Amino acid sequence: MVDFLAENNLCGQAILRIVSCGNAIIAELLRLSEFIPGVFRLKDKADQQKYGDIIYDFSYFKGPETCEGKLEAKPELLDLDEEFRENNIEILTRFYLAFQSVHKYIVDLNRYLDDLNEGIYIQQTLETILLNEDGKQLLCEALYLYGVMLLVIDQKIEGEVRERMLVSYYRYSAARSSADSNLDDICKLLRSTGYSSQPGAKRPPNYPESYFSRVPISETYISMVIGRLRSDDIYNQVISIYMGITVNLAEAWEPYKAAKTALNYTLDLSNVKEQASRNAAVTERVHAQVQQFLKEGCLREELVLDNIPKLLNCLRDCNVAIRWLMLHTADTTCDPNNKRLRQIKDQILTDSRYNSRILFQLLLDTAQFEFILKEMFKQMLSEKQVKWENYKKEGSERMTELADVFSGVKPLTRVEKNENLQAWFREISKQIMSLNYDDSTAAGRKTVQLIQALEEVQEFHQLENNLQVCQFLADTRKFLHQMIRTINIKEEVLITMQIVGDLSYAWQLIDSFTSIMQDSIRVSPSMVTKLRATFLKLASALDLPLLRINQANSPDLLSVSQYYSGELVSYVRKVLQIIPESMFTSLLKIIKLQTHDIIEVPTRLDKDKLRDYAQLGPRYEVAKLTHAISIFTEGILMMKTTLVGIIKVDPKQLLEDGIRKELVKRVALALHRGLIFNPRAKPSELMPKLKEMAATMDGFHRSFEYIQDYVNIYGLKIWQEEVSRIINYNVEQECNNFLRTKIQDWQSIYQSTHIPIPKFTPVDESVTFIGRLCREILRITDPKITCYIDQMNTWYDIKTHQEVTSSRLFSEIQDTLGTFGLNGLDRLLCFMIVKELQNFLSMFQKNILRDRAVQDTLKALMSAVSPLKGIIANSNKVYSAAIAKTQKIWTAYLDSIMKVGQMQILRRQITNELNYSCRFDSKHLAAALENLNKAILADIEAHYQNPSLPYPKEDNTLLYEITAYLEAAGIHNPLNKIYITTKRLPYFPTVNFLFLISQFPKLQYNRNLGVVCKRPADQIDWLPLVLGLLTLLKQFHSRYTEQFLALIGQFIRSTMEQCTSQKIPEMPADVVGALMFLEDYVRYTKLPRKGSSQRTLPTPSICATKELT
């Protein structure tokens, strides 16, 4: 009969593929369970209020039209729903495909069983497959894996969450309109069961059998599989289902009377006591044996080869003892609310004399013992044939030499010539050489016969009297014995060790020993070398899910291997993280000593003061702590490069990653705690907190500078990379508030699995510290309460005239957060400006374009001022009437304009600080960037003049990349930036002009300070107003700006004409304001003064401007 798993056996290959797919599905479900979007749990009040109306469970299907109708009735809900779809459709699709694969799995299994019944697989039936060892195993595994899938889904992805995700996928995808979609079947299979994985949660009625029966499976198949399992398997009280998912049968079998009755005999307290006491005795005995074997020099090759059964029995007993104790004493396997289970567990803990540290030591020693044995057998297997041939050659040569001795040619002392012995020894030599390695059974038998013959020849021919001959015979027998030992080295021993040493049941339970492992490392860093064997033992658990995938040659092998290997490596990192933590604890003490206790030695020192500066105590303490850091480093580096699953773990990289992780954790926490501001504090806490934070960051920086030589890492490189990553990640998360499509953690280029940046609960409207910093700066420089004097780069309180802050603020931020911090702040301000401009456009649409009275006023004004080059008669009356009729819209308009202007001032300050810093710290980079920028701009300008010249193509990233460098170096002008794309807006220049002249009465010109607010109650600041309008106009076509400037020019000419006709000697304040606006406009836009003045003003007004300035 053809082998069931042979490639040409279609029946075997079909079920093998199904089982292989099942293992891959479980890995995908476990992987996805770590990426469930928190919003689908609706646990937070904020999430419930925001998303409660757009996230539905299966109640949605009772009336989808009603639910959709409620959404369509509220435009803001529709907008939120669309945003939610954009952000979550990718992960929802991934979850849906996983759920779909579970349904497809059971459909495929049912189809396979139908094919068997219909005779599609010739000569194969359910009965014949169950008689085959491999077939029986695969059929059992197929059903078992389906059960595991459903249990994993219920344990890892709560029922309500599943329903909400499936409904969201249904609403957002094309599945609802697809005729061949099986979404209904998937929903029926995976609807909520009522099960909860929370401790103490009540088990739903008829669970899990009602859950398992949602897709009918052949009852004949199930009963036959159970029949085989009943006759083959031995059950225990606590079992591992799959990769560490454990079940206590005493709890799981509670609803089933027959099973419960059968189990009760086992769980009788007297029986439990007997089992626990026996296990305690076995544990003590085998631990002593293992410790004896692990003594230096005990596990020699000869001893191992002579005692293979004994060693394997010891290994088996150790693993059985560990398994029994770990499963029956774990907290997760016992419901604390179940009195009976608690009693049984307490009985086990007492009678087994359970001690977690002793159990851990046994696990450690067993893993070490197993590792040494495996390595020895691997080496012996690799050298097996070479050694066997050497022993054969040596034995044959000994016999040939003895034959020569008895020939008389090579006389030995008192050895007479004996032709019979000579011929006999030559024959034995030939017999030894004729032994065939490939036929190990025959060779072994013949070797035993040769040993007996050599013993007999020594006895019958009375050769004992000659020591040299005896020695030759003894050596030959020894070589023949070695040949027997060597030929008996079989790969089956390694396979047995692999099966016996399986630790997959502890895939999750091992975490309960993490604290013990870390304590051991803290006390003795060299413990890492022993833990290496334990990690490798845990890696053997990967064989379970990968076996069938590998046999089926499935493409899922790499993905599943990477998942489980990655999980194990993450656990290794978690355990070894204690080393960087301990190093940093010592580092903080060193920095404290160096900063506060140890006085810096001056360059010149009097001899009598030498003792004072010696400070032997503190210096000894620093040396001691430094030595401790070196010992920790040495400990982790003693662990050799290890292949964990398919991932190579390099201890040096592990150490560096651990140091990075600890640095990130501490720096992120310091930034989170250090940059929390009280908005009511007067004066602001901003500068003191920044100074304090700068000192903290300097301490971290100095500690890294100090540590790098002792642990052999590039301290400055790590510092810059990780601090920039922390800041960029926090900026990205803060900017998510302004994005419709959010950047999730798993999409972020700054977030890392191995070196994660921690997320903290927001303390105010900001998500991160960078948001709090930005909003605090905006709060203290609010143009309603401060006045910005550009010549001084300083903000003053509008009431008290006291300085609030100045450009020194940005120098302080540079000292605290570096270039990355300033650049991140600049990016965040960009997003805020975009948001404010978008709000402005919405407000413009609502308050102006949809207001009929305002529209009529604007239309009348445009009629009155046309043509723009002319002069308006009775201009004061025309302008005043228009302002009076539109007065109600200017408050919101002013707020929006000044916010944009305020943020532009801050951006200019940041740009100046970045540029100064770049020129000072890296003048060559600054020069190179400036020249490259000029060269690119010259080439682009030349291209527009002559299109045949080259220009960067769309797929060329040069312009994008150079922009990032230029912004980081402060080589750009924020006022020239286009923030939003805009459409044509009717009356836009006119509205802005009206707005500007409506504000002039609140302002006055001061020869020393420029234009300032007349009264503090008016809450207006000149420069934010100017820069806000400038930025706003920049977002539209240049003709709007030209029309706006023409309206101002007309306003100045008309007002001056009216003053001249009325013989008013002084220039009106409004004209002064308009002239000052033009002056500042030309200055900040860097437009040529001559062209601008010619477009807007007559010559007398230009003279007036000169007089003013």
Image (cartoon, grey):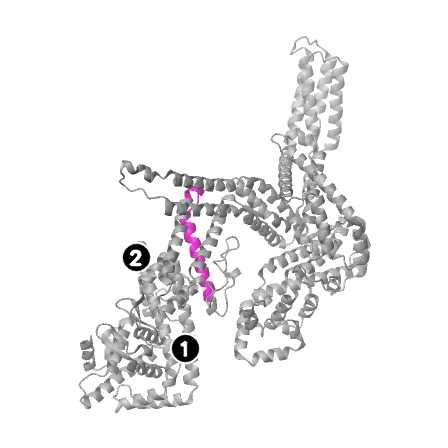
Indicate the position of residue 59 as horizontal and vertical percent values.
66, 74
Please report the residue visible at 63 percent of the width from the left and 62 percent of the height from the top. Answer: 157
Circle on res. 919: 2
Residue pointed to by mark 1:
840
* Circle nearer the N terminus (2, 1): 1
Dividing the picture into quadrants, the one containing residue 789 is bottom left
Q: Say above or below: 307 vs 503.
A: above
Quick check: marks 2 and 1 in contact, CB under 8 Å? no
| 412 falls in the magenta region | no
- Bounds of the magenta segment: 708-735
Q: Is residue 604 left or right of residue 657?
A: left
Which of these two is toward me, 460 or 849? 849
User: Quick check: 988 above or below 447?
Assistant: below
387 in relation to 1099, above or below: above
Q: Is residue 408 left or right of residue 687?
A: right
Q: Is residue 722 magenta?
A: yes
Crowding near the residue tagged with mark 2, few <14, some 14–19, many ≥20 C-alpha atoms within 10 Å: some
Q: Which residue is at the front of the view, 482 or 578?
A: 578
Q: Secondary structure at mark 2?
A: helix
Q: Position of residue 538 (x, y in %)?
A: 62, 46
Amino acid type indicated by mark 2: Arg
- Residue 1039 in the image: state x and y as whole percent: 33, 79
Q: Can residue 815 be seen in this snapshot?
A: yes
Q: Tell me if 1089 is positioned left or right of 995 in this view.
A: left
Compute the Cα span from label 2 to label 1: 37 Å
- Horizontal relation, residue 1069 to residue 138: left or right: left
Q: Please say whether residue 124 is visible from this viewpoint.
A: no
Q: Pinpoint residue 851: horizontal percent, then vertical percent.
A: 42, 87
Kind of element beneath mark 1 = helix
- The answer to which of 786 and 269 lies nearer the viewer is 269
> What amino acid is labelled 1 in the image?
Phe
